[in-house]
Image (cartoon, rainbow, N blue to C red):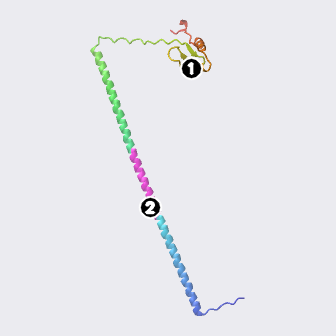
């Protein structure tokens, strides 16, 4: 067994003083750490508030810019509508003036009858001399420049004679008079 050391009273008092000093020192360190933590928390809160204020300012600026762009767009749209309205009014006024002039001209010459409109003369369709055997829309009268489809037909081994035969066989047949609607 180990023997316990015995201390004198002055040594014990010195140890007690050291212990008290150590306790006070640790309490001061703890208070300092708590103060520093509180300061750090306050700084962090201030930074968060500053960031929130900056974000709010950015949102406000963005909203203001969006509002300004909306106003500009609305003004442009209103200007377009106004221009279109004025153009429509001008066109309507011009048409009304034409109509009034026409009516005035007719009123000035009531006895002169307007000549009847000339009957529409339809040009006679050219005689189809060549026709593609599988596509009736491809036709040629034999006059003018040769279409590309005929050149392609000839290159692939076809003959003009075959196109003539196709035109004869596939040509639209005239409807007899007895079948025409009256």
Q: On screen, 33 above or below 22?
A: above
Which residue was labeled with disc 2? 50
Residue drawn where x is 42% and y is 51% of the image = 62
Tell me where residue 150 appears, x and y as whole percent.
56, 18
Image point (40%, 47%), residue name: 67
Front-lying residue, 182 or 66 = 66
Magenta region, residue range: 46-70
Count of numbered badges drawn on the protein: 2
Front label number (2 vs 1): 1
Name of the residue lying farthest toward the left: 108
- Image coordinates of residue 121 in percent, x first then y, are 43, 12
Rendered residue at 35%/35% (across/down): 83
Circle 1 — which element? helix
Check if residue 65 falls in the magenta segment. yes
| Percent of width and height locating residue 120 | 43, 13
Q: Quadrant of residue 52?
A: bottom left
In this rendering, the answer to whether 82 lies above or below 152 is: below
Residue 77 among those drawn in magenta: no
Residue at image point 54% right, 84% down:
21
Callout 2–callout 1 Cβ contact below 8 Å: no
Nearest the viewer among 2 and 124 is: 124
Q: Where does residue 6 sit, x and y in percent of width and height?
A: 64, 92
- Determine the secondary structure under disc 2: helix
Is the residue marked by circle 2 packed among few (<14), some (14-19), or many (20+) residues within 10 Å? few
Q: CA distance from mark 2 to mark 1?
A: 80 Å
- Secondary structure, magenta segment, majority class: helix
Closest to the observer: 121 or 68?
121
Q: Which residue is mark 1?
A: 151
Left or right for 46, reference 21 = left
Q: Tell me the crowding category of disc 1: few under 14, some 14 to 19, or many 20 or more residues within 10 angstroms, Cα based.
A: few
Which circle's residue, 2 or 1, is located before the other in the chain? 2
Q: Is residue 164 above or below residue 20?
A: above
């Amino acid at each position: 067994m180990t023997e316990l050391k015995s201390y004198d009273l002055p040594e014990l008092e010195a140890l007690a003083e050291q212990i008290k000093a150590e306790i006070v020192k640790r309490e001061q360190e703890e208070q300092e750490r708590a103060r520093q933590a509180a300061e750090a928390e306050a700084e962090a809160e201030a930074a968060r508030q500053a960031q929130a204020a900056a974000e709010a300012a950015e949102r406000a600026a963005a909203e203001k810019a969006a509002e300004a762009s909306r106003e500009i767009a609305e003004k442009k749209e209103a200007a377009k509508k106004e221009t279109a309205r004025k153009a429509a009014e001008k066109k309507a006024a011009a048409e009304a003036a034409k109509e009034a002039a026409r009516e005035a001209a007719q009123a000035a010459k009531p006895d002169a009858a307007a000549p009847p409109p000339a009957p529409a003369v339809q040009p006679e369709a050219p005689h189809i001399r060549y026709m593609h055997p599988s596509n009736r829309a491809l036709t040629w009268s034999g006059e003018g420049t040769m279409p590309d489809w005929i050149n392609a037909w000839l290159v692939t081994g076809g003959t003009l004679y075959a196109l003539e035969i196709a035109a004869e066989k596939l040509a639209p047949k005239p409807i007899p008079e007895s079948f025409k609607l009256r």
